Amino acid sequence: MANASRIEGKQMKQEMFLPDDYRPAEDEPFMNDRQIEYFRRKLLTWKGELMAGSRDTIEGLQDGTRNIPDVADRASEETDRALELRTRDRQRKLVAKIDAALRRIDEGEYGYCIVTGEPISLKRLDARPIATMSLEAQERHERREKVHRDD
């Protein structure tokens, strides 16, 4: 029942006006309504672009099944298709991360490091809106990962 009222609240919430030139600034309260809306829109736009690219790839693969008699040309086309499929797989995983970031926005956890609980810098979030760790926590994580990988 609580979920239903939360969903109704979201649907009833009037769309916030956000100027086209708005950029989150350090001198405003962290993760205020304008910043949240800015990142929500950025994530949704990014997801829309990825999904459109996936549709184009699927259509291209369906249209591209033709018989190419030359072995070298066929091999080249197969290589191109494999590369395209790998790219789309990475993008599929990225869409899942975007969905997770949108869930964090809905849950009020977006913008805070999952390790330290500290705010993630606005510059980092603007560059990588799916970030879950502050730059410092991410660097520590990568150093630990590198040490274990070298073993």
Image (tube, helix red, strand yellow):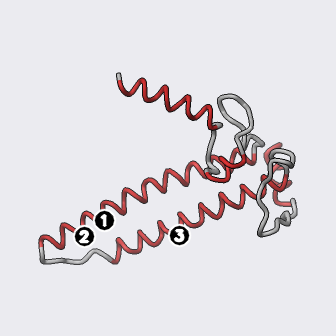
Residue type beneath disc 3: Ala
- The image position of residue 8, as x and y in percent, is 84, 55
Label 3: element kind: helix
Task: Please report the residue visible at 13 percent of the width from the left and 77 percent of the height from the top.
Answer: 69
Residue matched to label 1: 81
Please give left or right for residue 31 compared with residue 70 in the image: right
Element type at marker 2? Answer: helix
Q: Is residue 16 visible?
A: yes
Q: CA distance from mark 2 to mark 3?
A: 22 Å
Question: Measured from the top left, where is residue 18 in percent x and y?
Answer: 82, 65
Identify the residue position indicated by label 2 in the image.
Answer: 77
**Mark 2: few, some, or many residues within 10 Å (few <14, many ≥20)?**
some
Position of the C terminus, as image quadrant, is: top left
The structure residue drawn at horizontal position 72% and vertical position 56%, both measured from the top left corner, is 40
**Gap in angstroms between the C-alphas marked 1 and 2:** 6 Å
Q: Give me the residue at 42% from left, 24% from top.
A: 147
Q: Mark 3 vs mark 1: which is more N-terminal?
A: 3
Question: Along the horizontal axis of the image, is 149 left or right of 41?
Answer: left
Q: Is residue 1 left or right of residue 97?
A: right
**Disc 3 target residue:** 52
User: Tag count in the figure?
Assistant: 3
